[in-house]
Image (spheres, rainbow, N blue to C red):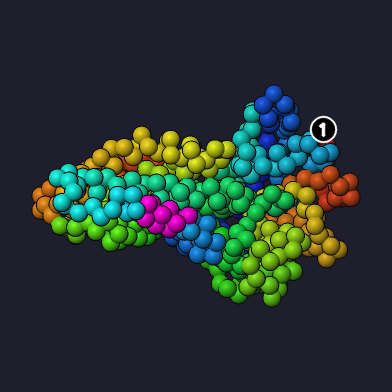
Amino acid sequence: MTNTIRLELNDVAVEYGARRVLAGVTFDLRAGETLVVAGANGSGKSSLLRVICGLQRPARGTVTIRIGAATYGPSEALQALGWVAPDLQLYRELTAIENLTFFAVVRGLRHRQEDLEALLDEVGLGGRGGDLLAAYSSGMAQRLRYAYALLHNPPILVLDEPTVTFDERGVSLVERVIARQRNHGITVIATNDPREERFGDYVLRLG
Amino acid sequence: MTARDTELSSRDPVREAPLLAAAWAVFRKDVRSELRTRYALNAVILFAASTVVALSLGMGPLTASRNADLPIIQAGLLWIAILFAAFTGLARAFVQEEEARTAAALRLAARPAAVFLGKLLFNLALLLLLVALTTVLFVIMLRVQVGNPMMLAAILLAGSLGLVAATTLIAAIIARASVKGALFAVLSFPLLAPLLVVAIQGSAAALLGRGWEYGVGPLQVLAGYTIALVVASLFLFNSVWEP
């Protein structure tokens, strides 16, 4: 099913009051493709990713997710989207395992404690699942964001500044995640680091 | 591919979680968070206790010898104390999500109806705790005679349900506003005025020791009010919750 997934943006514009940040972005991505959205600070990269995830309403244009013959807006296809971004915050008063358990339940995922712990191992947080998120460093918190985004194996993965706060091992994690996502879905990456353009099949330059 | 990959990749990417299970998860998460942070509990308990202490110090015991209209005055004061203590805490369920910036993670994971129902349940639990505390303090410190305690309990429960039904949606509306506290009270009061009138009259009848025939009317009104508001809120919440 995920092999037939498409992400279509048609003439998407984003405005903040009188200031137009994005004007008429259009693209069409299919499973296995990765798009890098590049641009300077304030060029609208994060806004575009938020529009794709349904977290922000565009001033104009549409975002369509096609799965097989069916079409959805982002808010109708929550299970199809995974998002990692610096402004994604999880619950600091809960532990990592409690955060993942909560999100697994509200997403209706069948899960076992071992699965969640395996996911934490995968993102480099093995053995730290019982710690409160408030006790995590910024790099650890970023790893937990990946665990949150990958929990439901989404066919569309949206990564905003994917390696921010990461050390070398963290960057390796991002490379593995993107490589794995190519096997079954779409990836959209926003970055102002020219080195990260290598992750994409296409580059969309904003600003 | 791991076993997790195989299972999750075969799932329908748009299948939604069972509503009640998701709502219950939101409720449990809020309870756990509140017990660890005391964000609303401290404010609510402090407000309830300080209001009743202020009333008792300012007015002294409200015994029957003081005024023939005492039951309605007692009922009015009790509901005002409950109302203002509720204002300090009932917006927390949504305001906390926006201020901690966890709302986006929740929007991406949970159905709006599950979020609303879970938050409604949390607000109800918080308010019932507040009502119990306020009522006990009120009765003890102002030496109020309760003629029909069961009817009073029923009116307080029905009124609390209505209060929560009215304020949970408004809490979601004001969560992204800049002047939250004042806006919450301003938007809530027109909706709550009818509930307060009925709840005060029903509570006064219970304090007087009147029979259940005097309580059925207010209970029916409060039940109808609650059902109407919960249904309306469920319809409207999508528009409030989505960006």
Task: Tell whether B117 sits left or right of B158.
Answer: right
Q: Nearer the viewer, residue A49 or B97?
A: B97
Does the magenta stretch mainly form a helix, a strand or a loop?
helix
Tell me the quarter of the picture where residue A114 sits.
bottom right
Q: Pointer 1: residues within 10 angstroms few (<14), some, or many (20+)? A: few
Q: Residue at x 55, y 51 (%)?
A: B96
Residue B24 in picture, x, y percent from top left: 44, 60
Q: Residue at x 81, y 46 (%)?
A: A191
User: Image quadrant for the N terminus of chain B?
Assistant: bottom right
Secondary structure beneath label 1 = loop
The kind of residue on which mark 1 rests is: Gly
Give percent across and percent down for residue A87.
69, 49
* Residue B18 appears in the figure: no
| Magenta-drawn stretch contains B52 | yes
- The one nearer the camera, A91 or A28, is A91
Disc 1: host chain: A
Quadrant for the C terminus of chain B, please. top right
Numbered range of the magenta stretch: B43-54
User: Which residue position is annotated with label 1?
Assistant: A207
